[in-house]
Amino acid sequence: QNNTFFADLFLPLKPKFLSFHIEEEKHPLRLIDHIRSRGTGPAIVLNPHTPISTIEHIIDEVDMVLLMSVNPGFGGQKFIPSVLEKARGLREMIERKNAKCMIEVDGGVTGLNVAQLDEAGVDIVVAGSYIFSSNSYEHSIRSLKLEF
């Protein structure tokens, strides 16, 4: 099956973004165009070991890049610290290319590393296990909010 088939399963739901793993797509521009033509923002996911250089040629074509900060598969894994430097590099690339692209990080996000992620230029964080395994959802969510 090609990834356009999988995208078409979700696009009728009208998501704001639809992401795909760059490691699994042979024709990313084709899929990006397909997603955008359906009124959804295309987003690319990079696994922890995938360098940001793999998307430099298409960074200005996507609305968001999701940096996985754990190896995909299951929740509750520990944050991989090298993703902070990866986020900094991605932010620099976005600015250098004048791209209109957000950075999202998913995996091992907690109240202890959210400020570092913000400093690295991350726009959106995903914190599942940190919230749902806590005794107080409200406290966990509050610890993720940064004061501006």
Image (spheres, helix red, strand yellow):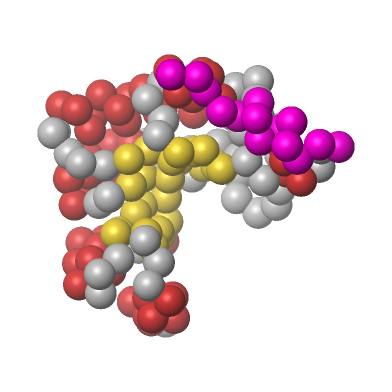
The image shows a total of numbered marks equal to: 0
Find residue 2 and report its horizontal and vertical position in percent. 37, 78
At a point 71% along the width and 48% down the height, the residue shown is 75
* Residue 54 shows in this picture: no
* Residue 25 shows in this picture: yes
Left or right placement of residue 30 versus residue 108 in this view:
left
At a point 43% along the width and 19% down the height, the residue shown is 148
Find residue 14 and report its horizontal and vertical position in percent. 37, 72
At a point 26% along the width and 42% down the height, the residue shown is 101
- Is residue 39 or residue 22 the one in the foreground? 39
The boundaries of the magenta stretch are: 135-148
Find residue 97 and report its horizontal and vertical position in percent. 14, 33
- Is residue 137 or residue 43 the one in the foreground? 137
Q: Quadrant of residue 134?
A: top right
Whether residue 34 appears in magenta in the rendering, the answer is no
Q: Quadrant of residue 13?
A: bottom left
On the rendered image, what quadrant is the N terminus found in? bottom left
Task: Please determine whether, in this image, residue 125 is positioned above or below residue 17.
Answer: above
- Is residue 59 or residue 22 the one in the foreground? 59
Left or right placement of residue 74 versus residue 32 in this view:
right
Left or right placement of residue 114 versus residue 31 in this view:
right
> Which residue is outermost to the right?
135
At a point 74% along the width and 31% down the height, the residue shown is 139
Left or right placement of residue 126 versus residue 103 in this view:
right
